[in-house]
């Protein structure tokens, strides 16, 4: 009997040590297991972990909480219902109008939505502005596929050069950041295209009106309730404002000075900002892509960091500077002032609450790095 007890002692000791390891792994202050996320690119529709994206680029939100995503490397437009079900609304690679999979895009960028559920998007490498109905029927509103240029005009007579950002006012006018032309363009409901600010072939950072204003590859654009436009002037590392008077001013950041500092006006710093959205409280939300951050800019130009850690990439969910992003680009807000982010480098769609809590809507294939069967 004594011999048998002696043989059992190592097994009991092993169980004890295993329990201690579990305790270390699953401490009482640890709310979840550490996870390693698989953010592989793909094109699958479905729910939750079954869905895949490939470099999602921009987002629009409708009144029902449905999200619409330009899935850029897949050349498709995707829909995510409020229940988290992903479907492909339209697209394949190319430049054709048509319905559903018969339509063709070439790396679509920014997207806006109207009250009827129609989408308006910048088909960036086709140099056109497209419309997608709620049923998935695609038409070309302005520009000519494959014809880069800078001409104002009506519908197919107009020319764009790598348009990216799109926003819409209550009268049905569209405003476009024509990135390759370093300009902001307007498209009326009748399809007439004009240049509001900037001059093609003349990049720079000057404030002023009309062609005296200069941009350097502007990307995101948003409009407020007073019809002021806010622009992520990406290569200038600044946020610009285009007022109703037609004058362009620099709201925050300093041209040519990249950084991640919070602060007011020119004391703040950005690094390749891309997406811009305005919530119902008037907050200007910015995806600061080169810094891997989500920033807030007040209407007076005071900049603060809402989520992410400057210069640190990753895909971690969490609060404030505990969260991680990888090239966040497009950004949108819903009626509750939640922020949705196309986390392009992670192939994920992320949600950021107004207080900076980050979660992933459709996280694919998480695996745990510890065996958290119990909480201690």
Image (cartoon, rainbow, N blue to C red):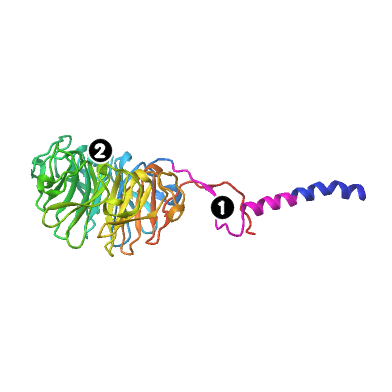
Asked if residue 194 shows in the view, the reply is no
Q: Mark 2 falls on what kind of element?
A: loop
Q: Mark 1 falls on what kind of element?
A: loop
Left or right: where 322 falls relative to 339:
right
Q: Residue at x 32, y 39 (%)?
A: 73
The image quadrant that residue 280 belongs to is: bottom left
- Sequence-wise, which precedes: disc 1 or disc 2? 1
* Label 1: how many Cα within 10 Å (few below 14, some 14–19, many 20+): some
Q: CA distance from mark 1 to mark 2?
A: 40 Å
Asked if residue 110 shows in the view, the reply is yes
Q: Which mark is residue 357?
A: none
- Give the magenta part as a residue range: 15-39
- Point out residue 246 in the picture as x, y percentages from the top left corner: 11, 53
- Point out residue 304 in the picture as x, y percentages from the top left corner: 35, 56
The image quadrant that residue 84 belongs to is: bottom left
Mark 1 lies on residue: 33
């Amino acid at each position: 009997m004594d011999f048998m007890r002696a043989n059992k002692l190592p097994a009991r000791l092993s169980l004890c040590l295993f329990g201690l390891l579990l305790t270390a792994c699953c401490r009482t202050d640890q709310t979840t297991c550490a996870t390693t996320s698989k953010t592989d690119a793909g094109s699958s529709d479905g729910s939750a972990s079954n869905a895949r994206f490939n470099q999602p680029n921009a987002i629009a939100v409708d009144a029902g909480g449905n999200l619409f995503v330009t899935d850029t490397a897949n050349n498709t437009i995707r829909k995510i219902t409020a229940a988290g079900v992903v479907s492909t609304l339209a697209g394949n690679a190319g430049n054709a109008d048509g319905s559903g999979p018969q339509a063709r895009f070439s790396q679509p960028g920014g997207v806006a939505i109207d009250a009827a559920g129609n989408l308006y998007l910048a088909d960036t490498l086709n140099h056109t502005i497209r419309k997608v109905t709620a049923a998935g029927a695609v038409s070309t509103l302005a520009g000519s596929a494959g014809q880069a240029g800078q001409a104002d005009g009506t519908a197919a007579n107009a020319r764009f050069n790598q348009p990216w950002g799109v926003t819409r006012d209550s009268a049905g006018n569209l405003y476009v950041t024509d990135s390759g032309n370093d300009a902001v363009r307007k498209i009326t409901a009748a399809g007439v295209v004009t240049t509001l600010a900037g001059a093609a072939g003349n990049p720079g950072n000057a404030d002023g009106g009309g062609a005296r204003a200069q941009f350097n590859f502007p990307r995101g654009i948003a409009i407020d309730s007073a019809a002021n436009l806010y622009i992520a002037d990406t290569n200038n590392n600044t946020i610009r404002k285009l007022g109703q008077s037609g004058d362009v001013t620099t709201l925050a950041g300093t041209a040519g000075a990249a950084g991640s500092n919070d602060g007011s006006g020119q004391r703040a710093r950005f690094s390749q900002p891309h997406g811009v959205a305005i919530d119902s409280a008037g907050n200007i939300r910015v995806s600061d892509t080169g810094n891997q951050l989500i920033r807030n800019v007040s209407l007076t130009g005071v900049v603060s960091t809402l989520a992410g850690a400057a210069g640190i990439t990753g895909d971690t969910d969490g609060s404030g500077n505990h969260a991680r992003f990888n090239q966040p680009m497009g950004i949108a807000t819903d009626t509750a002032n939640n922020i949705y982010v196309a986390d392009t480098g992670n192939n994920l769609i992320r949600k950021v609450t107004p207080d900076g809590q980050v979660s992933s809507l459709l996280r694919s294939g998480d695996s745990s790095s510890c065996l958290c069967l119990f909480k201690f």
